[in-house]
């Protein structure tokens, strides 16, 4: 018996928690999360010492907790002041307001490019005396290579914003920077008639098939707005009651071509004319082309809140390709994820058996450990970009969407609000949460919870977090 007591004391001392607290934490974890399908690590935020671990070295799927790795790596390798650049070129001669040559758009993956930027392109062309373009509109998307479809996007999810394709020429319809999407809003008409619809920023080369029907007020809204698999065709179907509407973000089939189409429509809308033979093309900017203008995005630091708080998959995968381009000369996912591993190794994380497939965590093939993620969260505190990283994390229970992010409706009780700054994660059968918390004692901790094969996993994670705050 004495030996057992000694072992318990040593065990507790090892984890730097009083026996009673350790027992409470262990009981909390096993009660809410179980023993086999959950990996949990808690560290002292000041020393980095692990104070509690269950399955801490077990390989688990991170879901969007993968963005902790890709985000921190991007801040390290690209820098907080990094800006994406989109260049506007022409070739040929301008005679009496007509450009006898081509207009080129050279992209670098800017996920924040919007209709307002397209209008700026038209203004620059007009300021240079161009009113008619007797040539082609050509997009240079050679900065990125490999498949535009991120790893892990299944057939049924390709239409949705979280499964958007990535390209060096892309656009966003809003300030959430949901790159490679357009927004379609359907509104009811007369009963029995087809609803009307709007598209923002414009049709972008997509074809809309409106098969929906307006029904009387109070009926069920069954409208769906989806892109038919592997096509430019968007289908609006179902019943739309009067007094209601339906809004959907729909992905572009070919971001480069669709964005160039959106640019051309915007230029024409601002008064620029294209000759009948003018075509949209994808190609390389020739060396003798003239650079008219470079559009620069906001800084990476300014983009970060939308990326992390809203768990933006497109930005994650664009950052991975951008790191590959900037560091290794190849803007591919394959090159980019090798840098995620390199960055993790630089933080003394044993990642030899980790698997990196993408930057967003959407892929089921990614594998990390809770010990490793918590080590990253500890080490990144020492970096000059930590404030940007930390401030971008969702804040538990904060109703402001751009503060609370994906945690704005979770952990809302008064004892938990603003105590937890953490990245959420979800893919089917996987729920994750990793970040920083302030215990009831006032002490700061780092934690990582990776949970698999448990339905309603967020509920159990939140119950675990509530108990951890209370007991630490």
Image: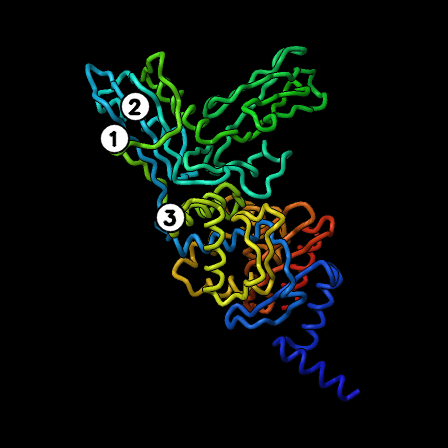
Q: In the rendered image, which quarter contains the N terminus?
A: bottom right
Instruction: Tell me the quarter of the picture where residue 16 sits.
Output: bottom right
Question: 90 and 379: which one is in front?
Answer: 90
Alpha carbon distance from label 3 to label 2: 27 Å
Question: 95 and 444: which one is in front?
Answer: 95
Picture residue at 54% right of the left edge, 56% below the top: 421
Q: In the rendered image, which quarter contains the C terminus?
A: bottom right
- Disc 3 crowd rating (10 Å Cα; few below 14, some 14-19, many 20+) is few
Question: 461 and 324: which one is in front?
Answer: 324
Image position of 257 (left or right of 440): left
Q: Residue furthest right?
A: 1
- Secondary structure under badge 1? loop
| Residue 424 point in image, percent of width and height | 59, 51
Q: In the rendering, which numbered label is found on residue 289?
A: 1
Question: 232 and 50: which one is in front?
Answer: 232
Picture residue at 64% right of the left edge, 57% below the top: 60
The residue identified by callout 2 is: 102
Alpha carbon distance from label 1 to label 2: 9 Å
Mark toward the start of the polypeptide (1 vs 2): 2
The residue identified by callout 3 is: 329
Vertical relation: 404 (above or below) 147: below
Mark toward the start of the polypeptide (3 vs 2): 2
| Residue 65 point in image, percent of width and height | 57, 53
Vertical relation: 295 (above or below) 80: above
Alpha carbon distance from label 3 to label 1: 23 Å
How are the colours assigned in the image? rainbow
């Amino acid at each position: 018996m004495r030996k057992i007591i000694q072992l318990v004391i040593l065990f507790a001392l090892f984890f730097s928690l009083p026996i009673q607290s350790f027992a409470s934490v262990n009981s909390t974890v096993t009660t809410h999360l179980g023993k086999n399908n959950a990996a949990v690590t808690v560290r002292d935020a000041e020393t980095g010492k692990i104070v509690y671990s269950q399955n801490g070295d077990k390989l688990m799927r991170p879901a969007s907790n993968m963005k902790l790795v890709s985000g921190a790596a991007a801040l390290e390798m690209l820098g907080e002041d990094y800006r994406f650049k989109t260049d506007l070129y022409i070739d040929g001669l301008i005679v009496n307001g007509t450009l006898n040559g081509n207009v080129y758009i050279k992209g670098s993956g800017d996920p924040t490019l919007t209709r307002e930027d397209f209008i700026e392109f038209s203004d620059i062309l007009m300021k240079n005396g161009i009113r008619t373009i007797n040539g082609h509109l050509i997009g240079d998307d050679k900065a990125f290579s490999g498949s535009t479809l991120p790893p892990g996007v299944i057939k049924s999810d390709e239409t949705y914003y979280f499964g958007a394709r990535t390209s060096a020429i892309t656009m966003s319809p809003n300030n959430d920077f949901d790159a490679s999407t357009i927004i379609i809003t359907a509104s009811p008409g007369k009963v029995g008639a087809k609803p009307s619809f709007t598209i923002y920023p414009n049709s972008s080369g997509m074809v809309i098939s409106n098969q929906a029907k307006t029904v009387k007020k109070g009926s069920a809204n069954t409208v769906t707005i989806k892109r038919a698999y592997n096509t430019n065709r968007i289908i609006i179907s179902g019943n739309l009651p009067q007094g209601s509407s339906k809004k959907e973000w729909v992905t572009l089939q070919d971001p480069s071509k669709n964005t160039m189409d959106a640019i051309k429509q915007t230029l024409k809308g601002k008064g620029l004319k294209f000759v009948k033979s003018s075509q949209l093309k994808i190609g390389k900017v020739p060396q003798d082309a003239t650079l008219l203008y470079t559009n620069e995005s906001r800084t990476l630091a300014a983009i970060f809140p939308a990326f992390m708080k809203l768990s933006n998959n497109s930005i994650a995968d664009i950052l991975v390709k951008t790191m590959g381009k900037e560091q290794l000369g190849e803007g591919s996912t394959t090159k980019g994820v090798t840098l995620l591993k390199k960055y993790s190794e630089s933080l003394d994380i044993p990642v030899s058996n980790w698997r990196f497939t993408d930057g967003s965590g959407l892929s089921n093939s990614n594998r990390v450990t809770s010990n490793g993620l918590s080590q990253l969260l500890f080490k990144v505190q020492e970096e000059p970009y930590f404030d940007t990283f930390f401030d971008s994390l969702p804040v538990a229970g904060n109703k402001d969407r751009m503060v609370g992010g994906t945690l704005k409706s979770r952990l809302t009780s008064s004892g938990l609000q603003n105590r937890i700054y953490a990245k959420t994660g979800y893919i089917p059968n996987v729920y994750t949460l990793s970040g920083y918390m302030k215990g009831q004692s006032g002490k700061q901790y780092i934690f990582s919870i990776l949970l698999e094969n448990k339905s309603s996993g967020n509920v159990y994670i939140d119950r675990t977090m509530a108990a951890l705050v209370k007991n630490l």
